[in-house]
Amino acid sequence: MEECGLQEATLWKFEERQDLAKAFLDTNLAKDEKMAENALKAIVPGAWHSPEHYYELRKLLEHDGYETVSQRNPSCYSGTPNAESAAKDTAFIRNQVLMPLLDAGKTVVLAMHAYGGLPGAAAAKGLSEAERRAAGQPGGILGLIFINALLAHEGQSLLSILPGQVFDPWVIQRVRILLATPLGVNSGLTSHIMKE
């Protein structure tokens, strides 16, 4: 549970956040209600989160019969941080998570948490169900859900979308890479989400 730096106590209590689960179940994401009901729910974790941090949400969805998938981003506490980047996370999400599902004919609702919004949205580009159908390809993404996530326009950097274009003190800046550490993060990113 601590592989990406968070203690079990910081797991979100999604049983109390039914609004988030309902967003996944919203059949208005597709004109074909049956397609939306059968859509796989994919979750892109935040910067130092692993799929285990979304256990409660996945349990709720799977209890209601929805298939879910979530994989750890390569940059999450990598043993080779100098080799990691948002571009590498984007390629991983697209090629290792999304494309196998879509090529198998699955429709997907993609949820992205925190940092996951940047590589997740970039990975989803051009993969909508309508775009793939028009190209004669199976599957496709029906909708994107951003959970307390970073959202940028194409071409914007992480720094350019932050308030005042200044990194928080817990971000370690290096010449070629940027690392976010979990030190002090609960006071800044998720404390407003869960108060227990």
Image (cartoon, rainbow, N blue to C red):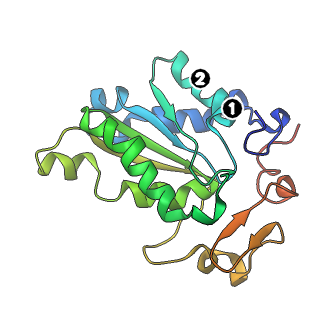
Q: CA distance from mark 2 to mark 1?
A: 8 Å
Image-quadrant location for residue 55: top right
Left or right for 185, reference 59: right
Q: Give the secondary structure at mark 2.
A: helix
Q: Amino acid at mark 2?
A: Leu
Above or below: residue 36 compared with residue 60: below
What residue is drawn where x is 56% and y is 50%?
74
Percent position of residue 63, x then y: 54, 16
Please rate how many residues cluster around mark 2, counting C-alpha atoms within 10 Å: few if below 14, some from 14 to 19, many from 20.
Answer: some
Q: Name the residue: 50% across, 18% down.
A: 64
Residue shown at 64% from the left, 72% from the top: 177
On-image quarter of the N terminus = top right
Q: Residue 134's spot in the image, x, y percent?
A: 12, 51
* Residue labelled with disc 1: 14
Locate residue 110, reporting x and y percent: 45, 44
Q: Are marks 2 and 1 in contact (CB under 8 Å)?
A: yes
Q: Earlier in the sequence, mark 2 or mark 1?
A: 1
Q: What residue sits right under mark 2 in the picture?
A: 60
Task: Please give the count of numbered marks on the rendered protein.
Answer: 2
145 sits to left or right of 125: right
